[in-house]
Image: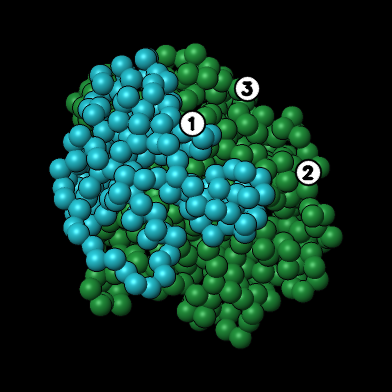
């Protein structure tokens, strides 16, 4: 979990019926795991998971969990109030471009860095910087985020 | 794919409303969305010296059903322009809508199915209908506009997890550009200032622009003698460091339209038709880039296809508009296209080369910041401007030498990279 996570994830009863890949992703995230699909044809990852390998179009894949380790290449911020009400309590927040060790590009919230020109300039001048994935627990949804390693 | 039109297609008529706020702009105030769509259509039809009775199909594009509260289907608009009992469709490709419509029309015409197609784009991003009233309108809060707009973006994972257009389209891209080309953040800021100054200069010379004040006039209105000092002040805050709010789109209500036909037919209708020489369309979900935020693969594919279909190279281009919801994104696209030297786009802006009278003129209508952005109508406004320039009818902002070849690039959020190539006939 993120060090700065301030909101609690509500407990959920396990569903008996089949789940969409979307729900499987968020369920895994709630447990601190980063669910992807690994293509059995080309070996590349589709993250977050979809119904098909986004790289080669193959429908033959298996579930895989990414390490969550990567490099923060760039970090900027958004506006407050934010477009999406889910993030009203934390805006303006830092948002970054991350390359995971598995070669997957991810854009996500970055925790532990202030959304100020001074803090972001320091990150830019020091970067790229190693980061680890974490989970922000919003009231209605776990959200992928990253923290400096 | 063969990537060619089997017959030459041309734009015989263009129309575009003032872009602005339907509660304030005199040219729009008091009108309904049906009426502004009809205004653009009428101008295009009269430019082609025909009525809607003379066309075969009407393609109407609109992206924001939430604000227009009419999906702007051709069935609803046709009655307002005299085009009942025609073929047609409602379509959208977000902010590429109207130019994707031109490509669809060209395909229909070159295939021999239709002779003449009317394409209309209409959008309101500043105002919406009030309650259940069929004619009263009210302002839309900015974050509401973006929430609705973001419905075009990855709804399974990106938007639910805090996707942010401001950083993704501006700040991250800006930092990638600075690092790639060794440009300091402070020099970047100066370049963006000069680029905004150019776009606002163009808007000040365009009676249809959303923003018609120069940047200097805005600074004076805020009590600053020096526009550069104003630029760096809290009155122009960072929306996504190091990008500031005046490097972004301004929202607008508006409509645009064009009449397309076989080249010979277009020439018979209008003495100054403009050939649609080529187009390329390529889409991508997020992320739009990986480790190099300045390179967007789908834009490269779309542009390569358009140039190949048109049989041109970047050296042939006399005028370019690239999608500039984010000014730095527009520079990156122009550099990818080969119109500007890689890493030198901001320097070109500082040297005045991107002005209407410069040697690399861009976005002479004012672009998304000054002309404004009415999502599904905007690509048509870009084409409208290019056609005016090619005809020598762009008024105060007319390029000294009429362009023979022009390229218009748009981003249909998020994303439909679209490039069209226009040629004088």
Distance in Å between CA atoms under marks 1 and 3? 33 Å
Q: Residues within 10 Å of mark 3 (few under 14, many from 20)?
A: some
Residue B223: give x, y in percent of width and height. 19, 26
- What residue is at 23 percent from the left and 62 percent from the top? A12
Whether label 3 touches label 2, CB < 8 Å: no
- What residue is at 31 percent from the left and 44 percent from the top? A32
Could you tell me which chain the residue with mark 1 belongs to? A
**Of the pair B48 and B1, the residue shown nearer to us:** B1
Check if mark 1 and mark 3 are on a common chain. no
The quarter of the displayed image where residue B29 is located:
bottom left
Distance in Å between CA atoms under marks 3 and 2? 21 Å
Residue B132: give x, y in percent of width and height. 25, 77
Residue B168: give x, y in percent of width and height. 41, 38
Q: Is residue A147 left or right of residue B60?
A: left
Please, what secondary structure does the residue beneath circle 3 have?
loop
**Of the pair B368 and B204, the residue shown nearer to us:** B368
Q: Nearer the viewer, mark 1 or mark 3?
A: 1
Q: Is residue B135 left or right of residue B153?
A: left
From the image, state the color of chain A: cyan
Q: Which mark is residue A101?
A: 1
- What residue is at 79 percent from the left and 55 percent from the top? B1
Q: Is residue B182 above or below residue A40?
A: above
> In the rendered view, how is the structure colored?
by chain
Give the mark, 3 or 2, whose residue is nearer the N terminus.
2
Tell me the green chain.
Answer: B
The quarter of the displayed image where residue B156 is located:
bottom left
């Amino acid at each position: 979990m993120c060090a700065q996570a301030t909101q609690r994830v509500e407990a959920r009863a396990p569903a008996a019926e089949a789940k969409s890949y979307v729900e499987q992703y968020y369920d895994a995230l709630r447990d601190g795991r980063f669910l992807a699909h690994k293509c059995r044809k080309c070996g590349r990852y589709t993250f977050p998971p979809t119904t098909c390998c986004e790289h080669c179009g193959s429908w033959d894949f298996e579930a895989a969990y990414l390490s969550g380790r990567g490099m923060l290449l760039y970090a900027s911020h958004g506006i407050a109030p934010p477009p999406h009400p889910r993030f009203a309590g934390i805006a303006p927040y830092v948002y970054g471009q991350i390359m995971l060790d598995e070669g997957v590009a991810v854009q996500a919230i970055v925790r532990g860095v202030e959304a100020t020109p001074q803090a972001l300039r320091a990150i830019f001048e020091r970067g790229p910087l190693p980061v680890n994935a974490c989970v922000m627990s919003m009231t209605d949804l776990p959200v992928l985020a990253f923290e400096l390693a | 794919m063969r990537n060619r039109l089997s017959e030459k297609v041309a734009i015989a008529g263009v129309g575009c409303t003032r872009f602005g706020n339907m509660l304030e702009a005199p040219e729009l105030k008091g009108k309904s969305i049906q009426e502004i769509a009809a205004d653009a259509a009428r101008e295009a039809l009269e430019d082609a010296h025909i009525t809607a009775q003379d066309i075969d199909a009407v393609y109407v594009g609109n992206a924001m059903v939430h604000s227009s509260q009419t999906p702007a289907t051709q069935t609803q608009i046709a009655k307002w322009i005299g085009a009942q009992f025609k073929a047609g469709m409602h379509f959208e490709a977000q902010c590429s809508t109207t130019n994707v419509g031109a490509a669809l029309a060209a395909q229909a015409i070159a295939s021999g199915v239709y002779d003449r197609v009317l394409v209309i784009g209409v959008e309101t991003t500043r105002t919406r209908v009030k309650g259940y009233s069929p004619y009263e309108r009210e302002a839309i809060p900015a974050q509401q506009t973006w929430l609705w707009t973001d419905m075009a973006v990855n709804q399974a994972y990106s938007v639910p997890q805090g996707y942010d257009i401001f950083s993704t389209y501006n700040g991250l891209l800006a930092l990638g550009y600075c690092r790639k080309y060794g440009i300091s953040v402070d020099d970047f800021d100066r370049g963006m200032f000069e680029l905004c100054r150019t776009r606002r200069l163009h808007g000040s010379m365009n009676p249809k622009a959303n923003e018609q004040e120069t940047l200097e006039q805005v600074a004076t209105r805020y009590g600053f003698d020096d526009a550069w000092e104003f630029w760096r002040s809290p009155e122009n805050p960072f929306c996504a460091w190091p990008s500031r709010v005046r490097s972004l789109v301004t929202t607008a209500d508006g409509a645009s339209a064009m009449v397309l036909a076989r080249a010979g037919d277009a020439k018979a209708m209008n003495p100054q038709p403009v050939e649609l020489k080529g187009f390329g369309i390529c889409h991508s979900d997020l992320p739009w880039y990986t480790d190099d935020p300045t390179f967007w693969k789908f834009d490269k594919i779309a542009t390569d296809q358009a140039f190949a279909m048109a049989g041109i190279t970047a050296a042939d281009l006399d005028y370019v508009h690239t999608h500039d919801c984010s000014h730095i994104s527009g520079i990156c696209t122009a550099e990818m296209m080969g119109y500007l030297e890689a890493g030198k786009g901001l320097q070109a802006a500082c040297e005045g080369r991107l002005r209407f009278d410069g040697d690399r003129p861009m976005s002479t209508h004012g672009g998304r910041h000054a002309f404004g952005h009415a999502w599904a109508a905007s690509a048509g406004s870009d084409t409208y401007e290019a056609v005016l320039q090619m005809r020598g009818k762009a008024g105060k902002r007319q390029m000294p030498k009429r362009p023979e070849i022009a390229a218009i690039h748009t981003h249909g959020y998020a994303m439909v990279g679209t490039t069209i190539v226009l040629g004088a006939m």
